[in-house]
Image (tube, rainbow, N blue to C red):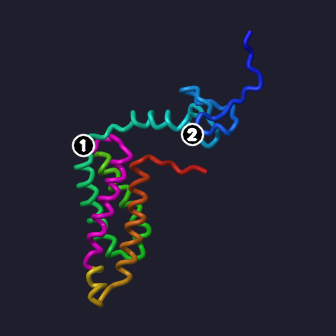
């Protein structure tokens, strides 16, 4: 009879941490640092990464069409934001959501974290094209500081709402 007494259960990654928590997929022992809470229970980071790869459904054409759409709409939104000044605080998030919905329709709701980041970067680049004349004027000595400030506010608010809308991140209490 081989009964093992006093055997410690330790995390597979951190042998100095005792734990009784197991990944509900691969059954590895995991500590609280290695555990990722999912709707079905706790999983190790490797199982979560493996599961996320299944959900990346974007195709190459999605990157091309998504980037073009976001850059053009980001540029047009930047033009609008240049005329409305303070009200950009209210309009920029709506423009970000509009860009996200247009991109989502074009890519047919396929998804990839890299795609969402690239599309957001393209929208930012398109919006910053509007700031280029102001930046050149800044270096030449005649500049409109408020125009640059509102463009910056537009870019931050638009990009954050665009990324959150595309990636489906939900902010909960």
Measuring 72% from the left and 30% from the top, which residue is drawn there?
8
Seen as rendered, the residue at the extreme front is 2
- The magenta span reads 107-133
Can you identify the residue that label 2 sits on? 36
Measuring 30% from the left and 65% from the top, which residue is drawn there?
77
* Alpha carbon separation for disc pair 2 and 1: 30 Å
Measuring 30% from the left and 66% from the top, which residue is drawn there?
127
Mark 1: few, some, or many residues within 10 Å (few <14, many ≥20)? Answer: few
Percent across and percent down for residue 108 are 29, 41
For residue 8, side relative to residue 102 (left or right): right
Can you identify the residue that label 1 sits on? 60
Against 127, residue 48 (above or below) is: above
**Helix, strand or loop for the magenta stretch, by majority:** helix
Percent across and percent down for residue 19 are 69, 34
Against 160, residue 146 (above or below) is: below
Front residue of 13/74: it is 13
For residue 162, side relative to residue 76 (left or right): right
Q: Is residue 117 magenta?
A: yes
Front residue of 137/36: it is 36
Against 58, residue 72 (above or below) is: below
Label 2's element? strand
């Amino acid at each position: 009879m081989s009964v093992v007494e006093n055997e410690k259960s330790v995390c597979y990654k951190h042998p100095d941490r005792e734990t009784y928590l197991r990944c509900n997929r691969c059954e590895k022992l995991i500590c609280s640092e290695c555990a990722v809470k999912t709707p079905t229970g706790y999983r190790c980071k490797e199982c979560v990464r493996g599961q996320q790869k299944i959900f990346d459904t974007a195709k190459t054409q999605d990157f091309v069409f998504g980037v073009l759409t976001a850059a053009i709409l980001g540029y047009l939104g930047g033009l609008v934001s240049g005329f409305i000044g303070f009200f950009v605080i209210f309009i920029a998030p709506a423009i970000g959501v509009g860009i996200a919905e247009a991109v989502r329709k074009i890519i047919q709701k396929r998804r990839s974290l890299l795609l969402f980041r690239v599309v957001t970067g393209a929208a930012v680049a398109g919006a910053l094209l509007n700031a280029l004349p102001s930046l050149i004027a800044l270096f030449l000595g005649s500049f409109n500081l408020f125009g640059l400030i509102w463009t910056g506010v537009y870019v931050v608010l638009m990009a954050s709402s665009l990324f959150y809308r595309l990636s489906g991140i939900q902010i909960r209490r």
